[in-house]
Amino acid sequence: MKVKFLVLCLYHVLILSCMAERNDIRAEKYEIDKNEDGVLDAVIHVIYRSNSKIMFSMKQGQSETRIFYYDNMERFSETDSDGDGIFEVVRVYGEDNEFDEFHRYPDGSIEPIDTNELNSKVAAENHAYQEMNNYIEEVESNIDIEKERDGPNRRTRDRRN
């Protein structure tokens, strides 16, 4: 009898600890209507475990992309570009914006894309990433210039936070 009670207690502790672990999962949803016509241009879901992003998904028209993170780094993504429910493009990410890309077929099979096509995509994404970083640096320097011009007594809103 005592053994059954002990097993039952351990079972409840295990269930409660699993439930407590799930309580640190948090989801955010963003609906984007750029021109305010009542038709959503995109729906974004972001899922966090504690304060770390673990999943990002965006549905835009028929296209949907899901990105999975580990240790705050993109590790895996998949894209359904035609809305048929099959995520045709699969990517696995490494360090320094490196990735490998695969094509998933309707039967579930996956094969790597052509090396030349991959190299072209990596170069294009690295260029876009660099352009984005240049833009962010320009915006940040303009914010710093505005703060400096306005002086310490004027309240300005730092958009970086």
Image (tube, grey):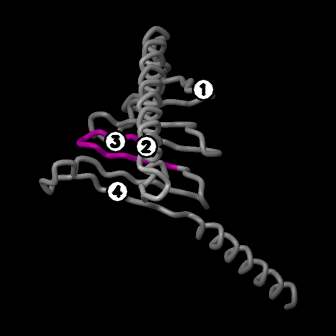
Which callout, 2 or 3, points to the residue nearer the camera? 2
Q: Position of residue 78 (x, y in %)?
A: 44, 36
Mark 2 vs mark 4, CA separation in Å: 26 Å
**Secondary structure of the residue carrying numbered label 4:** strand
**Secondary structure of the residue carrying numbered label 1:** loop
Which callout, 2 or 4, points to the residue nearer the camera? 2
Q: First in sequence, mark 2 or 4: give its number.
A: 4
> In this figure, which residue is indicated by the disc labeled 4?
30
**Secondary structure of the residue carrying numbered label 2:** helix
**Secondary structure of the residue carrying numbered label 3:** strand
The residue lying furthest to the left in this view is: 37
Which callout, 3 or 4, points to the residue nearer the camera? 4
The amino acid beneath tag 3 is Glu
Contact (CB < 8 A) between labels 2 and 4?
A: no
The amino acid beneath tag 2 is Ile
The dominant secondary structure in magenta is strand
The amino acid beneath tag 4 is Tyr
> In this figure, which residue is indicated by the disc labeled 3?
64
Mark 1 vs mark 4, CA separation in Å: 28 Å
- Residue at 31% of width from left, 34% of height from top? 81
> In this figure, which residue is indicated by the disc labeled 2?
143
- Residue at 45% of width from left, 47% of height from top? 147
Quadrant where the N terminus is found in the figure: bottom right
> In this figure, which residue is indicated by the disc labeled 1?
96
Mark 2 vs mark 3, CA separation in Å: 34 Å
Q: Which residues are magenta?
A: 55-65
Q: First in sequence, mark 1 or 4: give its number.
A: 4
Based on the displayed image, in which of its 4 quarters is residue 135 positioned? top left
- Residue at 70% of width from left, 73% of height from top? 17
